[in-house]
Image: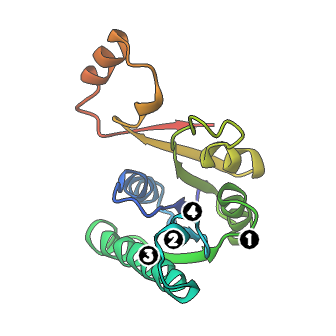
Amino acid sequence: MIKHILVAVGAHRDDAVLKTAIDKARHMGARLTAVYVVDTLPWWALAGVEYGCLDTLQMVEELERTVERRCNETFELDAWDIDTRALTVPLKGGVGRTIARLADELDADLVVVGAGRSPKWRFWEERVSDVTARCTRRSVLIATSANVREDAAASEDTHRHARGRAGASVHAHTL
């Protein structure tokens, strides 16, 4: 029986993964923990900073607060009847490994992650969902929205399949 669900959220505005976890928690009667893994020194922050390291840290902290605020707002609107909490953790080793380690520490029964996209030119990198599933013995639910498959070849069958499923906003696959 699933009693605790850990959902990995990101900085993007797509709440499909969070809403999938909320639905699953409500259906199972489980408590829900949303986690945002914070990279304290991301490459994009260094590229955009003109005046040094203090600005970088402030940008990262602001993003962290924004994600946590968005999770709490979603919880207040959509998960008012579920035991929820949002937290942020520092990056240690990689996002997928950090999520897997946190799932073990919190004794989560299920981990919900987004499918993500495979990097096109960085062939050595893996999807967060793949790393998370490989690094934990917990059940992993990979939640995808209907328009996630941007990295797939755009064939006529793909477009026909996407049009047929346009009414379903979220699909879930279990590894």
Instruction: Name the image quarter holding residue 100.
Output: bottom right
Q: Mark 2 packing: few (<14 Cα in 10 Å), some, or many (20+)?
A: some
CA–CA distance between discs 4 and 3?
Answer: 20 Å
Quadrant (top left/top right/bottom left/bottom right) for the C terminus:
top right
Residue occupied by mark 3: 63
Instruction: Name the image quarter holding residue 69.
Output: bottom left
Identify which residue is drawn at 73% across, 71% down.
Answer: 105
Amino acid type at mark 1: Glu
Identify which residue is drawn at 45% across, 56% down.
Answer: 21
Q: Nearer the viewer, mark 1 or mark 2?
A: 2
Amino acid type at mark 4: Leu
The outermost residue toward the front is 50
Disc sitting over residue 6 in the figure: 4
Q: Nearer the viewer, mark 4 or mark 3?
A: 3
Residue 15 against residue 77 in the figure, above or below: above
CA–CA distance between discs 3 and 2?
Answer: 11 Å
Percent of width and height locating residue 90: 65, 75
Does residue 34 appear in this view?
A: no
Q: Are marks 4 and 3 in contact (CB under 8 Å)?
A: no
Identify which residue is drawn at 55% across, 71% down.
Answer: 46
Q: Mark 3 packing: few (<14 Cα in 10 Å), some, or many (20+)?
A: some
Disc sitting over residue 45 in the figure: 2
Percent of width and height locating residue 154: 38, 19
Q: Of label 4 and label 1, which has the lower sequence position?
A: 4
